[in-house]
Image (spheres, coloured by chain):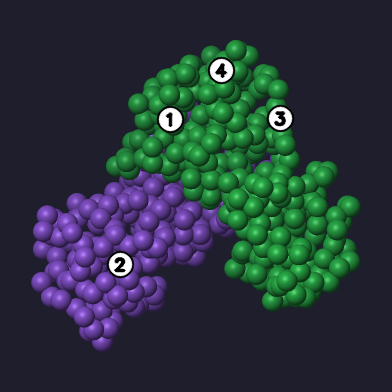
Chain colours: A green, B purple
Amino acid sequence: MKRIESPQNQHFKHWKKLHNRKWREKTGEYLLEGPHLIQEAMKKPDIVISLIYDEGFRQRENWMKNNADEFIVDTKLFKELAQTETPQGILAVCRVMDEQLIVKQGRFLLIDSVQDPGNLGTIIRTADACGMDGVYLGAGCVDLYNQKVLRSAQGSHFHLPIIKSDLTEVVNDLKQAGATVYGSSLQGTTLQNVAHSCENFALIIGNEGNGVDEELLSLTDVNVKIPIYGLAESMNVAVASGILMYSLRTAPLA
Amino acid sequence: MKRIESPQNQHFKHWKKLHNRKWREKTGEYLLEGPHLIQEAMKKPDIVISLIYDEGFRQRENWMKNNADEFIVDTKLFKELAQTETPQGILAVCRVMDEQLIVKQGRFLLIDSVQDPGNLGTIIRTADACGMDGVYLGAGCVDLYNQKVLRSAQGSHFHLPIIKSDLTEVVNDLKQAGATVYGSSLQGTTLQNVAHSCENFALIIGNEGNGVDEELLSLTDVNVKIPIYGLAESMNVAVASGILMYSLRTAPLA
C-alpha cells in the first residue's frame, strides 16, 4: 500500500486529470466515487484498477480488494480528487470496458444526443430496471463516465452492456435481425395505438430539446409519442424513456 | 419604472432574502427566473407582483406586463438575485397562491417527502403532462418554490393546483369521495396485476430512500410496485411516478 502526500506525485496528477473527458478518453480510465458504486464495479472482473482511500476512511481493512492496487492519500489531496460535496472516503480508478454486442433477439435502447448527465444516468438506471439487453449510445451524448452520469445511474453501468455506436448502423442491423424499431417523436403515433412487440424491439430516444435526429426517425418501423393530457409542452426525457420502455415491455404482444 | 443601483435598497434586500425558504414562507412570495417561466406565470392572474430587469435585458419594451411593477437593476445586483449560471436578464417576484381543492372525482397525485428539488419539479411536470387534476404535497417535501423545483417543473406550477396538505386527511377524504387510492411500495402488487380504475384515483409516491410512509401505505386500497427485470435495486422516483401515473391513467378500466 502506497501513501501519497504530494500533489506532485505522478499517480495523483494522472487521477486528477481524469476529471477531464479528454484524458479519460485518451487513457481509457475513469474515477468512481463512493462505496456503493465501487462495490457494484467490483462484482465484475477487470474493472477496478486501483483503490484510493482517504487517510480517514475506516472500513479499509474489510474492504473487498480483488487485485486492485491500493493507495492512501492525505485528506487535502483526497478532496481534490472527489467531486461529490460530501466525499465518502473511497475512490476507484476504473478501466473502460470495450463492450461488444452481437446483435440478436432482445430489447435494446438507443440513446441519441442526451446532454444532461443526470438524465443519461437515470435513463441507464431505468434501462437496467426494465431488463433491457443493451444500450447503444450515439455520438453527441454526454460522456458515460462523467461523475454525475455515474452517480445517477447508481451502478447500472456495470449491469448491462453499454456500447458507443453509430446509431444508423445499429438501427439497420437490428432491423435485419428482425427487431421492431420504435422512435420517440412528438409527431409519432400515440403509444397506446401502436401494436406492441414485447420481446424483440429497439427504442430510440433523443435530445432534451430537439428529440431524435430526423434521419434516424425516418429509418424506424414506427414512431411513437406519449400523449400529453395537460398543459405541459413536453416531458423530461428520462421520465419519457421510462414510460416508453415499460409500456413496450409489458403491453400484450401484438 | 424604478432603477435600483444600491444593494442597500429595501426592495433589493427583500428580493435577495427570497432565496431563503423561511423568508419565502413568511412573506408568501418567491422569485421566478427566465422568460419562459415568467410567461407561464403571467397566464394566470395575480401571480406576478413585480418584474425585475437586468439593465441589459433587450426585450423589455415588448414584454407583457399585466399590472406588475417594473424595476431595472444594475447587472452586478441582478447577478446576485439570479440563481442560474447564465441568467437570462429577467426575474419576477411572485405571490404564492393559496390553492384549494374541494375533493371530488378525478385523478390526484400525493407526494410524500420527496427531497430532491429536481425530482419534485420533474414529478410536477409529469403530473401536468398526465393531466392529473391536482397534486397534494405532504410535509417533508423540499420547498415547492425552490429555484431548482421551479426550473425542472418548466411552468407546470401554473398549470394545475398544488396543495400543501396533511396526506392522511387527504387519503381519508378521497376514499370517502369514492376514489381508489394506490400507494407505491416495493412490497406492493406488481402494477400489471392490479385492477385499474382510470378515472377516479389517487396515487401516493414517496421519499427517494425510504419510499412512502408506512402509516400512509396502510390506509390505501392497494399498494403497487413496478417490476424490476434487471439488476437495478430501485428506480428514480420521478421515473417511477411517471410510469405509475401513465399506467393508471391509460390502462383499461377494471
Quarter placement of the N terminus of chain A: bottom right
Front one among A204 and A99? A99
Q: Chain of mark 3?
A: A
Which residue has dot 3 on it?
A100
The CA distance from mark 4 to mark 1 is 15 Å
The CA distance from mark 3 to mark 1 is 24 Å
Q: Residue at x 46, y 59 (%)?
A: B117
Which-is-in-front pick, marks 3 and 2? 3
Disc 3 residue type? Answer: Gln
Q: Chain of mark 2?
A: B
Q: Position of residue B72 (x, y in %)?
A: 18, 71
Q: Secondary structure at mark 3?
A: loop
Q: Secondary structure at mark 1?
A: loop
Mark identifier at residue A213: 1
| Disc 4 and disc 2 in contact, CB within 8 angstroms | no
Disc 1 residue type? Answer: Asp
Same chain shared by disc 3 and disc 4: yes
Res B81 → quadrant: bottom left
Which residue has dot 4 on it?
A172
Q: Secondary structure at mark 2?
A: strand
Res B55 → quadrant: bottom left
Q: Position of residue A168 (x, y in %)?
A: 53, 24
Which residue has dot 2 on it?
B31
The CA distance from mark 2 to mark 1 is 36 Å
Figure check: B132 above or below A48: above
Q: Chain of mark 4?
A: A
| Disc 4 and disc 1 in contact, CB within 8 angstroms | no
Front one among B102 and B84? B84
The CA distance from mark 4 to mark 2 is 49 Å
